[in-house]
Amino acid sequence: MIVFVVRRIAGLVAVLFGISVLTFLIFFSVPGIDPTRAFAGRNPTPQTIAAVRHQFGLDRSKPVQYVLMMKRIFITRDLVSYGNTALKVVPAIWQAAPVTFSLVFGAAAIWIVFSIATGVLAVVFKGTVLDPLLMIFALIGISMPVFWLGEVANLITQDKLHHTFLFSWVPPLGYTPLTQDPWQWFLHLIIPWLTLSVLYIGFYARVLRANLLEVEHEDYVRTARAKGLSERQILLRHMLRTSLIPFVSLFGLDFGVLVGGGALLTEVVFGLPGVGLLTYQSLVNLDLPVIMATVIYGAFFITIASALVDILYARLDPRIRFT
Amino acid sequence: MTSVNGKQVAVIQQGGGKLGLGETPIGPTWQWNYLLGADQQGRDVAARVLYGGRASLEIGIGSALICSVVAVLFALLAGFFGGWTDTLISRVMDLIWAFPVYLLAISLSTVLLTQSQIKIGFVTVDQSSLWVPTLIIAAIYVPYVFRPVRGQVLSVREKEYVEASISQGASNLRLMFDEILPNALPTVVVMLPLMIATTILTESALSFLSIGVQPPNASWGTIIDDGQDLLYTRPMVAIAPGVMIVLTVLALNLLGDGVRDALDPRAKVRAR
């Protein structure tokens, strides 16, 4: 186990280094790109260009530039936004992170419950109309762009129907911190949670159904049947448990990706001031320091999260340690 | 197919100076010119959706094809030669794989969009060209195709007919393209419809974030972005292109399931 953990952490460090180099290369040395122009925003004056060149150390060699940049992002944390020099990028990211976490945690809880229910129902009613019907709904869920679904949700809950009893409880777009008012926090987030979870409910339900059907012919299921267990016990105690193993590793990955930037589109549509919205606002102005910092922090979060999931997984399932 | 024929439809109707509320209709209507109503500037939404579909489909299909070709070439090289070639290519692919798709696309797009023209060697690409999003989307999905194809190449390489061909003195190129490639291709064909579905969704997301297709071009994603500001006054501007995306992607997903069931016997057993 210790050997596995050490090896995994060594791999993690290598990947983190690789990601930081790759990001650096994208922002500073894509062929045909002048990084000074990139960092100076749209239509810069010659003075801005000279200032930017010096500020980012672009007059020095590439390895020095890399070290300088990483120092400003991780150690001194004094990277400032191009458009608004009062905005320090790294503290802004930390401030926005709880919003993103709130959004993703809630959505994750919803999609786990609903996807397991849908997948199990589809298997229970296999051979009837319900199974293909559920799977078609799941496929439609996968096919919908989340930002469009969010706009449709806004149209339904904020427009004319908002004045009826159905949706009069929905607050205007925005966010209230959990510590300030838990009930308002919940009301503000419920529609974004549902919107974000639709895609994953569809996807996970399909995966779970396929896994359940795959283990149906395993020996231990036959043994359980021969012992005279009820179908319900076989499905929930025996089949579902093994089918959840790939489900858990998928979940770890998707959760990391969402926190690390995947929730961007949902945050934009619902005006939630998370890391994604911060990135989006800088996208509109092509504010590269902010984008680069959020990208690096997001990628780091995802990589570290997936390493943790792997270690946890090896703890749960000893077979993995030796592969 | 209707999207492709959008070429023949006029995009800007002559409003005769009559724009705005009460003058240009809010969709849907029965007027021939404005089946889905007009947007703020009096442009017919239906025509824009058809035009936008052209860009969305071009980028979606184009990037999926480019991505597959590049991934297959690398997979052939890595799988056939093995050794340090394989290690080098696979490590680079692993690194891109570890980078989250959207973050990579956002970084590449923003950096390229800050330049008015992109010069690579002799080629100069305009910043608003459709090639920019196409190539970016193609690049970020390469590892996702590379991995399974490389695995396939590795297993095909050990087959008897490849050995037979070697004994007949076939050159490396001949082995790679005549013997191994045809047997590794089904893996790509099975993935292609799902790839196109994914690339279309990615394109719409990037365009929605204003870093995909640039004006004057339009795609379904950019029209939804326009529609965000008009959501409560002219809802059709946002709804119509979204419905088109859902229908297209749903059709591609169904096609993908069908192709997989037809070509991959193992998956067929599982699906039953």
Image (cartoon, coloured by chain):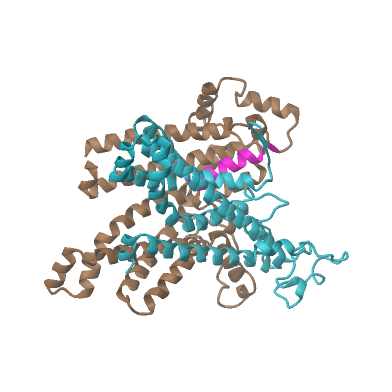
Whether residue B99 can be seen here = no
Which chain wears cyan?
A: B
Quarter of the rendering containing residue A212 = bottom left
Q: Who is closer to the viewer here, B68 or A72?
A: B68
Q: Position of residue A166 (x, y in %)?
A: 55, 76
Number of residue marks: 0
Q: Is residue A65 above or below residue B231?
A: above
Furthest residue in direction right, as rendered = B16
In this view, B121 is above or below B39: above
Give above or below for B87 relative to A259.
above
Give x and y (percent) for residue B244. Answer: 60, 65
Residue A133 position in % (x across, y down): 42, 75
Q: Residue furthest left?
A: A227
- Residue lying at 34% horizontally and 31% vertically, measured from the top left: B83
Q: Going 69% across and 45% down the picture, which residue do you hit? A: B128
Q: Position of residue B43 (x, y in %)?
A: 76, 63
- In what quadrant of the picture does the C terminus of chain A appear? top left
Question: In the image, is residue B240 part of the stretch drawn in magenta?
Answer: no
> Residue at horizontal 33%, vertical 33%?
A10
Left or right for A8, reference A285: left
Q: Quadrant of residue B31?
A: bottom right
Q: Colour of chain A?
A: brown
Question: Hey, which residue is sitting farthest top in the picture?
Answer: A60
Residue B112 in magenta? yes
Can I make out residue A247 in this image? yes
The boundaries of the magenta stretch are B98-117
